[in-house]
Image: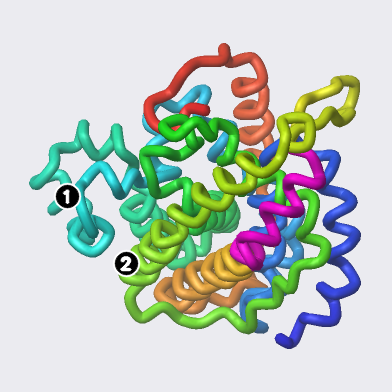
């Protein structure tokens, strides 16, 4: 167990209770960014802990931006199976090379998450070099989101919501329903953040690992559905003032058991990888003394976030290219 394990052991059940009130589907990203803070070394953790609420709340901002930023959606996924057999091993690791081979329009249609993570890594490194508190926090929150997305199997396939195999809804089941119901019992201790000698290889390794799990994610749900009646698979729950149809707790727990800890392993892996990327950016940015920086976002940054939140709140719902369900 890592240095901060006992602190998390106390806080994790509290986090679970708090996040059940958050918007549906936001639970995982917020928890992972929060956990990643505790992987950081002494030179970073004070600054990041002082801003842990910012990093937690804003972990979901990239999803919110999808309604107002046209090119946001492709940054969250990569449909590996659009590119042929074993494409995860063959796709160019440099974005410029991928554009030269496939064209930017094709890449945008089928997702760019690993290339986007590398671009974000470079931006966060530059923010550390510039000792810019606002950019460090903003980019850390966003980078954590995209790294976590790369760790979700259904973010690596064209059948991202089971829509091609009669399993529509499986994305939310795996990514949101299971963690919401069960993560209070997960072991999410990841150890100390480690320096990534090759960040490009690290994020592609995450994509490869995620894509390898796609078959089991789909197969086990289909097998379980064949064994359980419809009234066992779904139920109704109260969320705020609304009664919503959801995967039943019985079905969710049975699916979780068949996956044999897969969601837990991926969450633990994602939390560690987020911390690794933050740490690597700090080191590559010259390991600045974060104690010398402003400890909180500027008034300008807070105003920008408020304005962005207002924009997303009034933005019309629209279908975006890519994983739009």
The residue identified by callout 1 is 98
Q: Left or right of 233: which side holds 314? A: left
Q: Left or right of 194: which side holds 252? A: right
The image shows residue 306, relative to residue 263, as above or below, that is: above
Name the residue at the left extreme. Answer: 100
Q: Secondary structure at mark 2?
A: helix
Mark 1, Cα crowd under 10 Å, few <14 / some 14-19 / many 20+, is: some
Along the line of sight, the residue nearer the viewer: 69 or 191: 191
The residue identified by callout 2 is 200
Along the line of sight, the residue nearer the viewer: 22 or 81: 81
Name the quarter where the N terminus is drawn. bottom right
Q: Main secondary structure of the magenta part?
A: helix
Q: Position of residue 57 (x, y in %)?
A: 71, 46
The image shows residue 71, relative to residue 288, as above or below, that is: above
Along the line of sight, the residue nearer the viewer: 308 or 93: 93
The quadrant holding residue 193 is: bottom right
Q: How is the image coloured?
A: rainbow
Q: Position of residue 32 (x, y in %)?
A: 66, 59
Q: Residue at x 45, y 69 (%)?
A: 281
Q: Secondary structure at mark 1?
A: helix
Q: Are marks 1 and 2 in contact (CB under 8 Å)?
A: no
Q: Position of residue 318 (x, y in %)?
A: 50, 15
Magenta-colored span: 247-264
Q: Is any part of residue 146 visible from this angle? A: no
Q: Position of residue 228 (x, y in %)?
A: 71, 40
- Distance from the alpha carbon under mark 1 to that under mark 2: 14 Å
The image shows residue 183, relative to residue 81, as above or below, that is: below
Q: Residue at x 71, y 51 (%)?
A: 178
Q: Is any part of residue 228 visible from this angle? A: yes
């Amino acid at each position: 167990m890592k240095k901060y394990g006992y602190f998390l052991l106390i806080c994790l059940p509290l986090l679970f209770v708090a996040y059940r009130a958050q918007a549906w589907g936001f639970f995982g990203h917020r928890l992972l960014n929060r956990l990643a803070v505790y992987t950081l070394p002494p030179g970073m953790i004070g600054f990041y802990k002082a801003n842990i609420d910012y990093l937690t709340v804003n972990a979901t901002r990239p999803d919110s931006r999808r309604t107002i930023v046209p090119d946001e959606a492709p940054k969250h996924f990569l449909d590996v199976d659009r590119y042929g057999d074993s494409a995860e091993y063959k796709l160019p690791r440099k974005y410029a090379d991928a554009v030269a081979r496939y064209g930017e329009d094709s890449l945008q249609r089928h997702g760019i998450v690993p290339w986007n993570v590398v671009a974000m890594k470079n931006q966060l490194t530059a923010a550390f070099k510039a000792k810019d508190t606002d950019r460090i926090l903003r980019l850390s929150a966003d980078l954590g989101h995209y790294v976590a997305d790369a760790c979700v199997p259904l973010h690596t396939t064209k059948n991202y919501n089971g829509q091609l195999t009669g399993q529509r809804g499986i994305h939310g089941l795996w990514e949101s329903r299971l963690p919401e119901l069960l993560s209070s019992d997960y072991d999410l201790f990841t150890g100390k953040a480690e320096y990534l000698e090759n960040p490009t290889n690290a994020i592609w390794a995450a994509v490869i690992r995620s894509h390898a799990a796609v078959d089991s994610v789909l197969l086990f749900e289909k097998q379980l559905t064949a064994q359980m009646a419809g009234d066992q698979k779904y139920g109704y729950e109260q969320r705020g003032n609304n009664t919503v149809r959801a995967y039943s707790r019985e079905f969710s727990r049975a699916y979780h058991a068949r996956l044999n800890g897969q969601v837990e392993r991926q969450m633990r892996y994602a939390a560690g990888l987020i911390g690794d990327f933050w740490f690597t950016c700090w080191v590559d940015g010259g390991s600045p003394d974060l104690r010398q920086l402003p400890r909180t976002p500027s008034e300008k940054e807070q105003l920008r976030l408020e304005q962005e939140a207002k924009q997303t709140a009034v933005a019309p719902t629209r279908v975006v290219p890519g994983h739009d369900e």
